[in-house]
Image: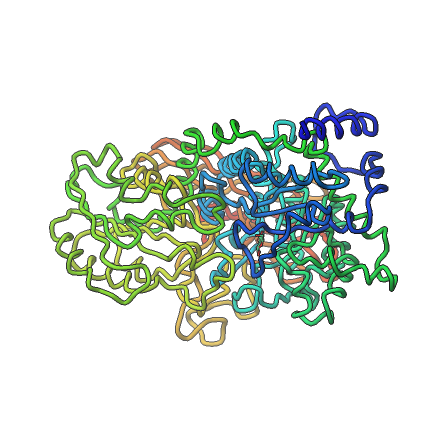
Amino acid sequence: MNRIFSVIFWATILSILSCSTKTRVIQKYTTTDPFIEGLISKMTLDEKLGQMTLFTTDWESTGPTIRGGYEDDIRKGRCGALFNSHTVAFTTRLQKIAMEESRLKIPLLFGYDVIHGYKTVFPIPLGEAASWDLDAIEKSAYIMAKEGAAAGLHWTFAPMVDITRDPRWGRVMEGAGEDTYLGSEIAKARVRGIQGNSFDKADRLIACVKHFAAYGAPFGGRDYNTVDMSERMLREVFLPPYKAAIDAGALTVMTSFNEYDGVPASGSKFLLTDILRNEWKFDGFVVTDYTSMNEMVAHGVVADEADAGILALQAGVDMDMQGAIYQEKIKKGLKTGEITMEHIDRSVRNILKIKKKLGLFEDPYRFSNPDRERQTIMNPEHLTIARDVARKSVVLLKNNGALPIPAKVRKILVAGPLADDKDNLTGVWSASGEGRHCVSLLEGIKSHPASGAIEITHVKGCDIDSDNKSGFDEALRAAAGADLIVLAIGEHKDMSGEAASKAMIRIPGVQEALLEALSATGKPVVTIVMNGRPLVLSKVHEKSAAVLEAWWLGTQAGNALADILFGDYNPSGKLPISFPMHEGQIPVFYSHKNTGRPFDPNSKWNTKYLDLPNDPLYAFGYGLSYTTFSYSLPGADRTDFSGSQSVSISVDVKNTGNYDGEEVVQLYVRDLVGSVTRPVKELKGFRKIFLKKGESKTVRFTLTPADLAFYDRNMHWVTEPGEFDIFVGSDSNTQNKIRIRYSK
Ligand code: GLC
């Protein structure tokens, strides 16, 4: 009865005070809403600060503190949102406390890190980025939102769009890699998938673009470490994906742990007000990361937590994640005049707008339907899509003909510590996903129809991270009787992710020694690498007949890999991040500057190492196929253009091999002379196309003057006249180019 009452109560209030809401289209709020203003006018200071307070439940820990007593906080109206709280049963129980026991009955907001799947786990975001398939990425994001919403959630702390060029940083697994253009396109696709255009069906989630800003550029690749770079670098390389996500409609932003230019992001007016609000017109709400407000004391920019809260509120933070500073400590600022009730009302307004947009005042339980939960979560359609996205995420790094597995192969040894592993396949940030639901590589191979006539043996051989070689003999004996060896090696899933940076990015333990021993038998070894970050794969490349980069592929991992091994799917992935030859090269990335002494193998006095090449082992955009593709020279409808004219670039791509397949056609630009130095290449377009064997297609790109713009010496965003090389090819090493000239 209480539930019906609260629904009627808010529906009545709403119908009196606010305009009709036939379709809840996400719109930019520009005027105050009488319903929200009326509610704010009824709230006590503690209730207002409560709406600005986000606590984790004790269900899971994603940070250094867990607090008790959140149920009592809900009763007192001193906590307006919770995270790490999911399932219909749990969210309903907590919502009822708010709706039946609090004074103003303001619905709770439920958040969770649904990053690459809620229960149906998709590839880790870095893996999905390797698909370069924006439709697949959007669909994956929609399914994760649909399952999360069916579990009673309203809000996910995704997409993470932090650009990084440092694979030592554990959270490289969570983003889209090193490139600004690819990262921006993927950010938009993920927001479209998560939020859609409406919350009317309660099958989408509020997106939260994170971690604002430049969290992926810590010194030494060490998580939480200092970030310092020019404003030019910040604006040209690191900020665009956040803006792309906001332009795509992301309704919340999460601040990052790091400082930028000496100020921690959670206290940075430059980031949170000057850029986010004033330049980008963001009108959602800003939440801190996990106690990142409190951590400004450790950063040394404030003396105590009360000052941290005052600095954060002044800078533009609306909601305090787990810090309990807004809840308990910033009232002092009202007395000193450092903050005003307008600051607080502004934040409360930003938060209540989102709750209203979700329809929670009309029906606080509209996301909590147990029947829908049962029917939606991990249904067969989702698993089918997860298998397809996983296949598209795999990158073929080497193949001397060992793949796809030839029909003559009658005996396969499946070896390695990850061959029959299920738990690691989810990767981290896998929400409610469970390893037990994952299909292992061995299971995938055994259940594939092609394996019916093949004798399959399995030997683990060694652990992921130990120096124990006692399993080698058994593996070598099994190898003696095999025609082909499929070896699954890599990291443990917890070797990447938050607080998981590594100074050495090698394959741990004795796994490479096992590869060498198996390779020495003379039998072809297909190595499948499972990992959350780029690793140094020089030895793997040398000793393997074929190499597949498989990341953490999620629930359908084994089936997706079997589809590739047996040729049902021709691998089409391309690396979204460079793989270094050695840690000493880091940061190594394709869009580097030319310098005044560019690399010259024939002279001493130029930018190089004495002990390593400059180039990574595998370049950004690299990935092989079972077929081959040829590219014509790029053509242009005009090589001289001016003013607002655009240029159409075209290239003929032909499938010259024996398999149908997909190719990611990449377009890069080089500005030969600028008022500031410019990268030797910048990705400015890509198309993922399908070509039957023997088929050709003409691929076209349109380049506008805006595509060539950058921040000039005076930090003005301009397109300067001059010559540009336009490259079109299969990866960032392409030299297939045409020169065009732009004049004002
Ligand atoms: C963590 C992460 C952030 C996550 C949040 C809530 O510390 O930095 O990405 O969304 O806390 O779990």
Residue 299: image quadrant is bottom right
Foreground pick, 134 / 296: 296
584 shown above or below 131: below
Residue 131 pos. (x, y %): 45, 42
**How far from the left and from the top, in percent, is residue 706?**
68, 45
Which residue: 72% across, 52% down?
718
Image quadrant in which the N terminus is located:
top right
Q: Is residue 23 visible?
A: yes
Q: Is residue 375 left or right of residue 491?
A: right
**Residue that appears at 82% across and 62% down:** 332
Q: How many marks?
A: 0
Residue 433 drawn at (x, y percent):
45, 43
Image quarter for ligand 1: bottom right
On the question of residue 702 being in view, the answer is: no
Q: Quadrant of residue 379?
A: top left
In the depicted view, which residue is nearer to us: 214 or 616? 214
Is 463 on the left or on the right of 44, as rendered? left
Describe residue 394's horizontal placement relative to residue 453 as left or right: right
- For the point 32% across and 40% down, the residue is 564
Q: From what the image shows, is residue 182 above or below residue 712?
A: above
